[in-house]
Image (cartoon, rainbow, N blue to C red):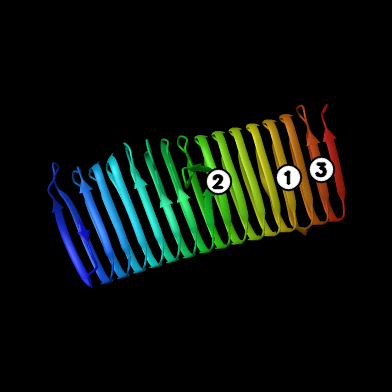
């Protein structure tokens, strides 16, 4: 079914193919809008397309599905929306765009038990893409972008996957570290869950999750902050938030049962976290400007707590290896350095510094 430009067009169609009870409802208001809807070898498929404005374009394909539903709403000018649903039961997809020159795509394929994809974009030149590819079970992906020129691309393959992305502002971007063809895609394992939120301008987040039962909650507020995040293994969890301007974070979790909870606030801060092994944990916060924290945990059951409070130009460098080691660092003031190295097992180190210009170096273990 193809409907071409009309000032006002309303169409309700019940498809008669080898299957039955398919329906398309299309509404267009404005000038030079275009939509195309196809339901091929489907049963109990329904589609609703509503466009108001000028030069909007909607394309919909439902193929070999049972009880599938698709909704496309576009208000404004020169928006583009594409939805493909192929081979599955009880598949649902929804796109809603308001503004101009926004682009939304949803692809859902293979034999899902349950899929739910939704895109909401408000503003200008925002781009979102959901793919949910093959063998997705109990999957849900949601994108909500408002502002100007925000970019997001999502891909989920694996069992019970859940991903939610929210961006507000200008020139924010979320990428995945792996590419599938010309498409940035992420989340491949089993039972993965990710929530990402960015507010401000020029924020960039690169992330990837692979493995079983991973969980990540990542947030950036401010301008031109960058976070690179990777989870591999089983049962790793991460809660990370960054506020301010021009701060950077690099986070790697590889192993099992590793845990991260960290908050960074201020300008020009740097955070590097590597958790390699099992049962490692890092908690803390950096508040101020030009602070740097480097934490390397390689081993099992390592614990580090790092707090840099209301200061500037302080560095905390932590290297932990072995098993069951513990580090506590608390620095308040300016220009401090704490460098702690631990190996072997059952080591404990405590550093507290206030004032300015203090240096603490601790080495424990056989090295």
Left or right position of 365 against 18: right
Residue 269 spot, x, y in % from top left: 71, 55
Left or right position of 176 against 288: left
Residue 233 spot, x, y in % from top left: 55, 32
Please tell me which of labels 1 and 2 falls first in the chain: 2
Left or right position of 57 against 168: left
Q: Which residue is mark 1?
A: 294
Mark 1 to mark 3: distance in Å?
Answer: 9 Å
Which residue does the image show at 24% across and 42% down from the upper left?
A: 65
Please tell me which of labels 2 and 3 falls first in the chain: 2
Left or right position of 138 against 216: left
Which residue does the image show at 77% across and 47% down from the upper left?
A: 316
Q: Quadrant of residue 332?
A: bottom right
Which residue does the image show at 19% across and 42% down from the upper left?
A: 41
Residue 114 spot, x, y in % from top left: 33, 41
Residue 305, relative to residue 235: is it above or below? below
Q: Quadrant of residue 122?
A: bottom left
**Label drawn at residue 339:** 3
Element assignment for label 1: strand
Which residue does the image show at 62% across and 54% down from the upper left?
A: 226
Mark 1 to mark 2: distance in Å?
Answer: 19 Å
Of 247 and 333, nearer the camera is: 247
The reply to whether callout 1 and callout 2 are in contact (CB within 8 Å) is: no
Please tell me which of labels 1 and 3 falls first in the chain: 1
């Amino acid at each position: 079914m193809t409907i071409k430009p009309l000032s006002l067009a309303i169409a309700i169609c019940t498809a008669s193919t080898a299957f039955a009870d398919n329906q398309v409802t299309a509404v267009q208001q404005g000038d030079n809008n275009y939509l195309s809807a196809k339901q091929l070898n489907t049963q109990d498929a329904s589609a609703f397309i509503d466009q108001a404005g000028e030069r909007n374009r909607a394309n919909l394909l439902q193929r070999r599905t049972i009880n599938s539903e698709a909704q496309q709403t576009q208000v404004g000018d020169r928006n583009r929306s594409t939805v493909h649903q192929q081979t599955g039961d009880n598949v649902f997809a929804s796109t809603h765009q308001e503004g101009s020159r926004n682009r939304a795509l949803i692809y859902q394929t293979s034999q899902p038990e349950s899929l739910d994809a939704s895109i909401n974009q408000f503003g200008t030149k925002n781009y979102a893409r959901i793919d949910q590819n093959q063998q997705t079970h109990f999957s849900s992906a949601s994108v909500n972008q408002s502002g100007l020129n925000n970019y997001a691309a999502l891909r989920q393959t694996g069992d019970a996957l859940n991903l939610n992305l929210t961006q507000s502002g200008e020139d924010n971007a979320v990428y995945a570290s792996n590419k599938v063809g010309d498409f940035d895609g992420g989340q491949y394992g089993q039972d993965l869950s990710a929530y990402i939120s960015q507010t401000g301008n020029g924020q960039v987040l690169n992330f990837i999750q692979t493995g079983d039962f991973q969980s990540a909650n990542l947030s950036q507020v401010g301008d031109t902050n960058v976070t690179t995040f990777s989870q591999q293994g089983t049962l790793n969890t991460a809660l990370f938030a960054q506020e301010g301007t021009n701060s950077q974070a690099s986070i790697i979790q590889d192993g099992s049962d590793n845990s991260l909870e960290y908050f960074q606030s201020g300008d020009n801060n740097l955070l590097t976290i590597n958790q390699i092994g099992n049962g490692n944990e890092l908690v803390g916060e950096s508040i101020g400007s030009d602070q740097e924290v480097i934490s390397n945990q390689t081993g099992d059951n390592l614990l580090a707590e790092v707090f840099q409070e209301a200061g500037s130009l302080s560095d905390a460098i932590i290297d932990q290896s072995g098993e069951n080691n513990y580090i506590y660092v608390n620095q308040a003031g300016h220009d401090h350095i704490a460098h702690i190295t631990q190996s072997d097992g059952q080591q404990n180190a405590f550093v507290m510094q206030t004032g300015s210009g203090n240096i603490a170096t601790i080495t424990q273990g056989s090295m």
